[in-house]
Image (cartoon, rainbow, N blue to C red):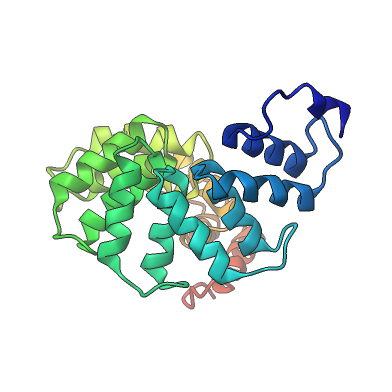
Amino acid sequence: MNPEIQTVTDLDDPETQFVLGVMYYYGDGVPRDLNKAVEWFDKSAARGNADAQFALSVCYENGEGVAKDNALAMQWLQSAAEGGKAPAQVNLAVKHYFGEGVPLSFSDAAKWLRRAADQGNAKAEFSLGRMYFDGKGVDRDVSEATKWYQKAADQGHLEAINDLGAMYYAGKDVPPDYFQATVLFRVAAEQGHMLAQFNLARAYAEGKGVAQDIGEAAKWFHKAADQGHGEAQLNLGRMYEFGIGVTQDRERAAEFYRRAAQQGYTNAV
């Protein structure tokens, strides 16, 4: 036995078995060995350890240390989710949402998202909020959507922060609040969220929630365009073509139009 493992006193303990699996999976203190990782995950999973069950489902889904087997991956994912593992519940929700390996069911997706969200999983909180907003698997309820978006946003979930800002900016389902919208857009935009960068640029261009500043709009359109946002590229093409907020540059305009056109903006020619 590896000397690093000889110090472990109870190899029959499910939690210890899971930890050993993790060590072999990542090569942490032992040579990386996916086969041994699966062996320990399997021992622990068979004893009901939800962490090991989730890890084993990932190994079967990806064919890591074991032959790829979607049926076994789903079996262990279900066990982990039922055992209370929040990331497993989120993954199972995604499977139900898209009908991957299980019947497509928005209601089952919402059920598993709620279980994970009730544990404070930010991804689940955001996704559940979106399901309430779209009315998929649950009755459409904007107040519930806002509640779950806010919970996810409070944990720094960038998509939730942006979507909450978009709700305040649109003002269709909640009272409009352009200032709060731009505050939220900025938080996400400064952390590199592409849609928030575009939304903040648009706010500067329109002068909503912030003083109109076309130069700032161009700056944020650039950041979104650099990440591949087609509409930002189209807007920059127009700005460079006519010298709006930037020095007129027909060559740069043509380049941005070309990039936008490659993403389906047919008027960007």
Residue at image location 43% in from the left, 65% down from the top: 95
Residue at image location 28% in from the left, 48% down from the top: 114
Residue 255, quarter of the rendered image: bottom right
The C terminus appears in which quarter of the rendering?
Answer: bottom right
Q: Is residue 233 left or right of residue 98?
A: right
Where in the figure is residue 105, as x and y percent of width and height?
A: 30, 70
The N terminus appears in which quarter of the rendering?
Answer: top right
- Would residue 2 be seen by someone viewing this image from the given angle? yes
Q: Is residue 136 left or right of residue 92?
A: left
Residue at image location 73% in from the left, 24% down from the top: 8
Judge by depth and name the residue closer to the eye, 252 or 31.
Answer: 31
Please tell me whether residue 226 is drawn above or below residue 95 in the rendered image. above
Judge by depth and name the residue closer to the eye, 44 or 263.
Answer: 44
Q: Give the residue furthest to the bottom.
A: 266
- Would residue 232 be seen by someone viewing this image from the given angle? no
Judge by depth and name the residue closer to the eye, 97 or 230.
Answer: 97
Count of labels in the image: 0
Q: Is residue 31 left or right of residue 19?
A: right
Residue at image location 24% in from the left, 45% down from the top: 169
Where in the figure is residue 249, as x and y percent of width and height?
A: 62, 56
Where in the figure is residue 176, as x and y percent of width and height?
A: 16, 43
Please tell me whether residue 228 is drawn above or below residue 32 in the rendered image. below
Where in the figure is residue 68, as x and y percent of width and height?
A: 67, 68
Please tell me whether residue 249 is drawn above or below residue 164 in the rendered image. below
